[in-house]
Image (cartoon, helix red, strand yellow):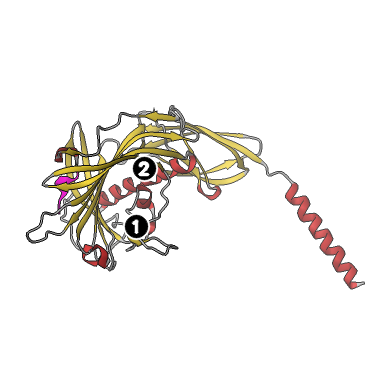
Amino acid sequence: MRGVFAALTALAMAWSCRTAAAQPVATGTVRGVVQAAPTNVALPYAVVSIPALNLERFSGAEGQFLLPAVPAGTHELVVRRIGFVPQRQQIVVVANGTLALSISLRQVPVRLTGMTVRAAKACTSPGLPDSLQFPEVAQLVGLLRENAATYRTLVQRFPFVYAQVRALGVLEDGTMAVRTVDTLAVPAQPTVRYEPGRVVQNTRGKVVRETFMAIPSIIDLVDPAFVNNHCFTYAGASTQGNETWFRLDVRASERLRTPDVHGAFFLDSATAQLRRMELELSRPDRLPSALRSVRSVIAHSTFVEIAPGLSILQSVCAINWQKPRQGARVSHGAELQHTLAWEFTTAPPDVERVTIRTAPRWRPATQLPGTALPCVGAEP
């Protein structure tokens, strides 16, 4: 009898669970507009999210956003935009109702005056700068990471592929001899994640192993693993055309005993958009024996704005600097990349699904002057 009662109880519980699971979840809608304070200018491509629900959307050209099918109840809404102070607020969603919001974001007040330029030094205390001791540097780091977070949202919500033209060759006496030119289709979502002290890796699962360099991408800048293993300093401002760029220097932690990266990041002072990223291999003296001839490796990247507040990779210039050899002419490996086009699976609001750009005039068996390689002047 006890067994029959237990079986009936289990059956009733199972039926109860199925019935509960079958009940539809009551939901509502959240919609609104994101504007700049105090001008009320619309802010396109602000990231509107409910982190607990893993729900994210971009605002449109007029700052409008829509979050459909939000479970009824209380949630934390987070609104972020490059160059603006993020806003967090509690919202209450009513079943079958629509919550209308007007979000005003204040621009980050980054000041040139009073910002102390510091020389790069050994990184012994890595991590985010103290916002009380170094408030301006902490702000710049926050802006840099917001660029990374926005790009991450873009590639996750709107996957796309780059078409890149690549020129490979050797650099001698400031001139690049182009050997090959090809075109690559590259997914915007990086296939290799940053690992502290593992920028130089070996291919896995193959009989013949090859060494490659997993240079951090823009997405890696928001990863705690990167932040917790680097130090950040403000390195001054410079004029680029009609823009003023802030330079933020980054150095790898001294506790990393194997090669990682140092870097310099350039942010537009007006929009906080990342314009340029310059990375250099740290600890080249710790490279594997097969790469002991390498003196340094640099990779400089530039970014192009495809919509207000939304940038993607534009170009890469990389050089593998070799150690000098007595009585011998030294050739340095050089690589140039340029984005020819990009194609979204589904385009973000008010962005063309496919964009094609002019190709550079790179040809095999030709010479490129040093002026065509923007990273040549960075020889260590």
Residue farthest front in this picture: 365
Where is residue 174, by image quadrant? top left
Which mark, residue 85? 2
* Sooner in the amino-acid sequence: mark 2 or mark 1: 2
Badge 1 marks a residue whose secondary structure is helix
Q: Is residue 327 above or below residue 149?
A: below
Give the CA separation, mark 2 to mark 1: 23 Å
Which residue occupies the foreground of this view, 286 or 267? 286
Q: Give the image location of residue 54, x and y in percent.
A: 53, 47
Magenta residues, start to end? 375-380
Q: What residue type is disc 2 on? A: Val
- Label 1 packing within 10 angstroms: few (<14), some (14-19), many (20+): many
Where is residue 255, by image quadrant? bottom left
Q: Is residue 184 magenta?
A: no
Residue drawn at the location 75% of the way across and 51% of the way down: 20
Q: Is residue 378 magenta?
A: yes
Which residue occupies the foreground of this view, 26 or 92? 26
Judge from the rendering whether residue 26 lies leftward or rightward of residue 327; answer left or right. right
Residue farthest right in this picture: 1
Badge 2 marks a residue whose secondary structure is loop
Q: Is residue 114 above or below residue 58?
A: below
Judge from the rendering whether residue 307 lies leftward or rightward of residue 253; answer left or right. right
Q: Return the residue at label 1.
A: 226
Quadrant occupied by the C terminus = bottom left
Q: Is residue 282 visible?
A: yes
Q: Marks 2 and 1: which is nearer the front? A: 1
